[in-house]
Every structure is written in C-alpha cells, then in structure tokens.
Image (cartoon, grey):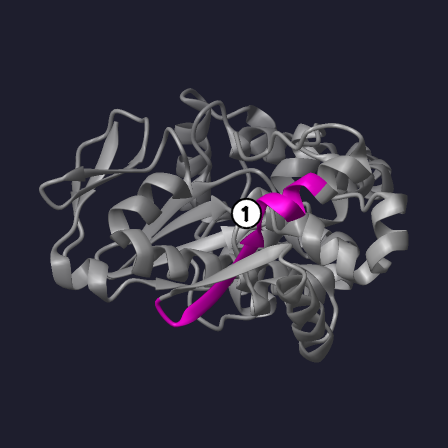
Amino acid sequence: MGWWQINADTLAGSRFVLSPLAETFACLQLLHRGTPAHPGERAWLRDHLPGYRARLAADPVTALLVRAGLGRSWIADFLTPTPRDRETFEEGVARVRAARPDAARAHLRLSLAGPLPPALDRDDLPERAAGLLTYVWTETVRPDWDRRRRVLEADVVARTAQVSRGGWAAVLDALRPGRTRWLGDNRLQVNLHEYPPREISGAELLFVPVTPRTGWVSWEEPDRYAVIYACAGVLADAGGRTVPASLGALLGAARAGVLVLLDSPLSTSQLVAVTGQGLGSVGRHLRVLLDAGLVERRRAGRSVLYSRTAAGQVLVEAGTGRPDTRRS
C-alpha cells in the first residue's frame, strides 16, 4: 500500500477545495469507462457518450492517448496536475498543455507499465490532452457546473461536520473506502500501490471531491499533495431519489423530496445544494417536518444536521411500498 507521513500541523491545516479540472478529468474517466454507477450517471452517459466516442473515432491518436494515459492501474501524472484552490478550468488545463513532451511520454510509459506505442512517440501529446479535456469541460461539464458545484460544496459541508463529530480519522477512512485509511503514527494510506512512503509534513494537503465514482492522488513535490475522492452518494445522485406520488400528494412534492433525502443526516445548506430550492423554502419545509415529528435535528460543530425520525421512515416506506434499506 502507498502511504504518506503527515504531522499534526499538516493535517490540521489541510483543506477541502473544489477543482473544475478534477471534475472534468473524472468525467473523462466516466466517459472512457462507459459504465454508470447510478441512474444519474446513466442519463448523463446517454446524452454525452455518443459525441465523445465520435470525437475519438475521428482522432485515433488522441483515442490511443486516452487509453494509455488512464493505464492499467496508474494515471499518467501530466493529465492530472495537482489541484489549486480557486483555480479555474482554463488555468488548470493550461498546466496540462504546458507539460514537457518528454515528461508526458515518460508518464505514459509508467501508466502502461511498458513501452510507448510508436503512434504516441510525438511532441504534441500535452496539447492533444488539453484539447480533449477542454472538449469534455465545454460539452459535458460546464453546462451543468452550477449544479455540480452545489453538490460538491454540500459534500464539503458534510465532511467538515464529520470532522467535528468523529475527528479526522473517521473522515479519512471514509474518503475512499478500502483505499484511504488512517493508519496511526501520523500515517495516511492513500492507495493500494506498493510504493515507498512519502514524507509530506509541512506541505499543503488538499482533499478534492468529484461527482463521478472515481478518485486518485496527485502531488507537486515538495509543496502540494491532494486526494481526489468521490463525493457522498446521496449528494452525487440526488436526482435518483424518486419521490413517491402518494407522499408528494400528502406533503407536497418539494417537501416530500426533502424528507426522502433525509435518510442520512444533512444540513440546510446541503439540502439547498442538492434540491436546488432556496434557503427560505428549505427552512420552511424543515420547520413543518420538525413540527410533525417526521425529522429531528442535532448540532455537529457549527452545522445543524437533520435526519428522518422513525415516524418519517414509516411514512417514506409506506409511500414506496417497501422498507428503505439504505440505512443498513
């Protein structure tokens, strides 16, 4: 396994940041994979996969570059420059474009764990990669970026509240289950690769959510390290939570949608993010649900988290006609 040595000051100073470039690369991975993890991704792939495949069919060199860059178990580093706080997509992709051609080829050989195909022995690989990422951003991510940003911001709120409830160890264990884990003795496991440990004490440590079900690590030695992880499922696929018609008729569709989402604790700001409703509307729905005994609230650090009560659970199950097993 790969792990980083982190002192207390580095962990205490770590931050969650959003990265349009990381989100775009995660979407590139999803397009390459072509397999949805939930109904929201299925609809997204239906809309965008044909255009993506047509673009690669018209550009065999870039198609080969994608297959090589995503590799068997390691991503070519030049494709995923370490995120920077408040960096725009244009600023991030400029760093991909500025990669040295010889470094790009070396990264591809590492991701392939073998020799470079002759068709990729060329100097325009960074430009081609930047062009493809720009296509994915422009055609598939930017039109929906406002919603994606709200979802990512909501995930950051949830993780921050988790720090106050259970400490950093609980958060790190949950970022990429089975891959990230707090090992104790100032050691953070970041993946399953058998690479030498890295001493990163004193560096900037960033945690970066993306909406597709993927993740990776990146670094700019010795100053910046990042763990990119998939945001919580309830946030990534909020659109997949169907509101039963009978529940919507009883409570109103918007209020019923809030109740359906609260199978796990969420803050008001998270609910605003994933529902698209205004803060005032969400607040009114929560007050009604609280007065009816369908939800309860508790404080977690600076956040107030809401979740369904047993009565709310019964109501949702009655509307769906089957027990809700997501809590098990």
Q: Is residue 109 above or below residue 139?
A: above
Q: Residues within 10 Å of mark 1 (few under 14, many from 20)?
A: few
Q: How many marks?
A: 1
Residue at the location (80% across, 30% down)? 321
Residue 296 lies in the magenta stretch: no
Type of amino acid under label 1: Ser
Residue at the location (28% across, 62% down)? 14
Q: Is residue 93 visible?
A: no
Front-lying residue, 291 or 217:
291
- Label 1 SS: loop
Q: Is residue 314 above or below residue 301?
A: above
Front-lying residue, 289 or 194:
289
Q: Which residues are magenta?
A: 301-314
In the rendered image, which residue does mark 1 sit on?
Answer: 264
Front-lying residue, 126 or 259:
259
Q: Is residue 90 above or below residue 265?
A: below
Q: Where residue 23 sits in the image (x, y, percent)? A: 58, 53
In which image quadrant can residue 172 be found?
top left
Left or right, residue 188 beside residue 138: left
Left or right, residue 222 beside residue 161: left
Q: Is residue 298 above or below residue 278?
A: above
- Residue extending furthest toward the bottom: 280
Left or right, residue 274 beside residue 189: right
Q: Where residue 194 sits in the image (x, y, percent)? A: 25, 24
Front-lying residue, 125 or 37:
37
